[in-house]
Image (cartoon, rainbow, N blue to C red):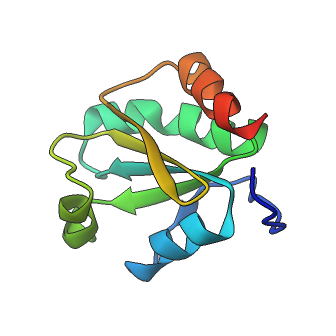
Amino acid sequence: MSSKVEAVPTEPIKLSNEGDLEEAISTYDVVLADFYADWCGPCRMMEPAIEALAAETDAAIVKVDVDRFQGLAGQYGVQGIPALLLFSDDDLVERVVGVQQKEALQRTIEGYTE
């Protein structure tokens, strides 16, 4: 783990501009980027788990609306949603696509936060 000291938010961060994702990745030790769309049923199914992970883990959760931030989706090779990208110490370390169980995501995150 690096020596970053910024307190991790307990609620998901919604991007206001493309630079916010890079800023979050450089600010927090572990960041889970949730690439989603409001019209996506599986994305809506994941929402309670994503909110719980923000409250229960030491990862910053960043919500990336693929309709609004198509450039970021392209930059990270997101072709299906929901897509969850996990960054640790500025590096992309995990990528999962589709609905995931909260417990499995929590174990993955904790592998990088403990």
* The furthest residue to the front: 2
Q: Is residue 64 above or below residue 16?
A: above
Q: Is residue 101 above or below residue 16?
A: above
Left or right of 100? Residue 52 is right
Instruction: Please tell me which residue is depicted at 41% across the width and 45% down the height of the picture.
Output: 85
Instruction: Please tell me which residue is depicted at 40% across the width and 41% down the height of the picture.
Output: 84
Left or right of 67? Residue 50 is right
Instruction: Please tell me which residue is depicted at 33% across the width and 61% down the height of the picture.
Output: 65
Instruction: Please tell me which residue is depicted at 39% across the width and 38% down the height of the picture.
Output: 44
Closer-to-camera residue (110/40): 110
Residue 87 position, x and y percent, is 52, 50
Give the quadrant of residue 106: top right
Residue 25 position, x and y percent, is 55, 64
**Quadrant housing the C terminus:** top right
Give the quadrant of residue 43: top left
Residue 28 position, x and y percent, is 68, 62
